[in-house]
Image (spheres, rainbow, N blue to C red):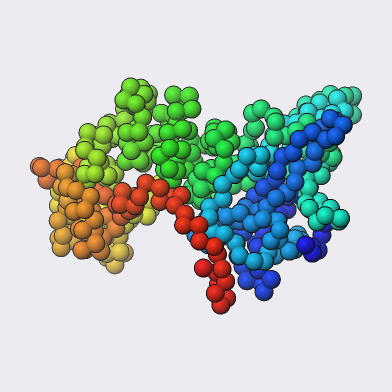
């Protein structure tokens, strides 16, 4: 391997673009995979970990493994690889450890007796005789005083790998640094990273996330991961996170739990939030009622365009829910008074603010019944090119709305978030496919 540098700290590499030799972008570096090895010959410490590959995010937000044998150049601005890259989703094996995901933030004991420190970065260095990359140094921050007056808390040090206890063998690993470095990431992308981690690390990060952020991430995780995280949390916090989730997503998750456990969490939730979820749980799986959100935007016919747009601007609304407002007679909380119709956001933008929304109702389609099948709902959305459709009960009262993303989630196979055909990525012209 040729390289512009023979030593670099991993934190500087994260987020760098990975290119082929012709300069076309392959993806972005997300983590470094290291192989933890046994004790040195003299038993002083573990041998320096071997860097075996990179985790690269390619088109479609998929994370794949690029062996170091395919990396031809590394510098502070870019990484260059060559040859085919297998598009199979990255999965850890045996002694493999993720540098950022599993070693950063760990606490290590310094072998000089001066106390403990938190790992914030690691240096990888290339051996000239073999070309192998090894983890040689740690950038650490002291977590407490000790070893004399000059040693202070928060002091930073660069130490050799051998001068600290094995970070991978440490117990609890805080996730403060990891969460801070991913605060701008979309929930779906964050969920994708958590899914690739060990169960232990996934829980550590989940405990560090704010309740609303964790709720958004849970909605994007496979059911197995959702259940594992929720059942390993304190019940009060689990109930709070469920309150932050969309009611239909919370209902789906509770459906996967034992009945007694689900009931306990519902009892700990705020009564209004729990009531929305309980109503969804009453419906048979696969019906419109089980898929809908019970809290769409609902307004009376005398409300103005200005009022409607003010509701639509609420940050917590998903784009699909904000695509239209439903018009009904009072009461406006589900189940409402008589359903009157729906007004699309695009139409609201074409009329003056004082205009009453009752004058703008679209009557070209009918709402769906709360007992309608998934296929019937999908057919209505496709027929009328809708992203949201109202759901009514037998008395023509609005009980919720179904969005296009609700239908897609139900129609796609359960493993769609992690499905992978393993096709190698190859270059065709100037792009990869």
Residue 21 figure quarter: bottom right
Q: Residue furthest front?
A: 41
**Whole-percent x, y for residue 321 in the image:** 32, 52
Q: Please indicate whether residue 274 sits to the left or right of residue 357 in the image.
A: right
Q: Residue furthest bottom?
A: 429
Q: Is residue 282 visible?
A: yes
Between residues 419 and 17, which one lies in front from this camera angle?
419
Residue at 43% from the left image edge and 37% from the top image edge: 224
**Whole-percent x, y for residue 184 in the image:** 56, 50
Between residues 245 and 120, which one lies in front from this camera angle?
120
**Whole-percent x, y for residue 175 in the image:** 62, 36
Residue at 78% from the left image edge and 51% from the top image edge: 133
Q: Please indicate whether residue 329 sits to the left or right of residue 24 in the image.
A: left
The N terminus appears in which quarter of the rendering?
Answer: bottom right
Between residues 17 and 342, which one lies in front from this camera angle?
17
**Whole-percent x, y for residue 153 in the image:** 79, 30
Residue at 36% from the left image edge and 24% from the top image edge: 261
Q: Is residue 301 visible?
A: no
Q: Is residue 76 above or below residue 224?
A: below
Residue at 40% from the left image edge and 51% from the top image edge: 416
Q: Is residue 148 above or below residue 388?
A: above
Q: Is residue 55 above or below residue 254?
A: below
Q: Is residue 397 above or below residue 169?
A: below
């Amino acid at each position: 391997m040729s390289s512009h540098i023979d030593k670099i700290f991993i934190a500087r590499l994260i987020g760098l673009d990975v290119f082929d030799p012709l300069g076309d972008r392959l993806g972005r570096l997300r983590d470094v995979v290291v192989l933890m090895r046994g004790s040195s010959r003299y038993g002083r410490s573990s041998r320096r970990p071997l860097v075996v590959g990179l985790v690269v995010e390619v088109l479609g937000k998929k994370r794949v493994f690029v062996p170091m044998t395919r990396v031809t150049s590394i510098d502070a601005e870019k990484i260059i690889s060559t040859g085919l890259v297998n598009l199979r989703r990255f999965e850890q094996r045996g002694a493999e450890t993720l540098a950022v995901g599993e070693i950063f933030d760990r606490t290590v004991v310094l072998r000089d007796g001066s106390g403990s420190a938190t790992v914030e970065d690691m240096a990888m260095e290339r051996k000239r005789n073999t070309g192998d990359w090894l983890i040689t140094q740690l950038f650490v921050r002291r977590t407490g005083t000790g070893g004399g007056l000059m040693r202070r808390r928060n002091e930073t040090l660069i130490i050799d790998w051998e001068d600290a206890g094995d970070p991978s063998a440490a117990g609890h690993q805080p996730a403060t640094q990891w969460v801070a470095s991913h605060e701008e990431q979309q929930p779906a992308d964050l969920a994708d990273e958590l899914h690739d981690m060990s169960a232990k690390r996934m829980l550590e990060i989940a405990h560090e996330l704010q309740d609303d952020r964790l709720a958004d991430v849970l909605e994007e995780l496979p059911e197995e991961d959702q259940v594992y995280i929720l059942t390993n949390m304190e019940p009060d916090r689990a109930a709070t996170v469920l309150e932050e989730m969309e009611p239909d997503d919370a209902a789906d998750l509770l459906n996967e739990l034992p009945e007694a456990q689900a009931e306990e969490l519902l009892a700990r939730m705020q009564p209004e939030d729990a009531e929305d979820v309980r109503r969804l749980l009453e419906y048979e799986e696969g019906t419109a009622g089980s898929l809908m959100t019970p809290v769409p935007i609902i307004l009376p016919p005398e409300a103005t365009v200005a009022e409607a747009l003010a509701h639509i601007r609420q940050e917590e609304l998903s784009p699909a829910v904000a695509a239209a407002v439903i018009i009904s007679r009072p009461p406006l909380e589900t189940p409402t008074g008589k359903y009157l119709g729906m007004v699309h956001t695009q139409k609201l933008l074409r009329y003056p603010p004082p205009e009453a929304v009752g004058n703008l109702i679209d009557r070209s389609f009918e709402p769906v019944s709360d007992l309608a099948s998934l296929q019937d709902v999908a057919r209505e959305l496709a027929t009328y090119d809708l992203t949201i459709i109202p759901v009514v009960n037998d008395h023509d009262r609005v009980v919720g709305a179904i969005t296009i993303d609700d239908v897609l989630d139900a129609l796609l196979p359960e493993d769609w978030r992690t499905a992978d055909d393993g096709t190698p990525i190859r270059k065709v012209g100037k792009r990869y496919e």
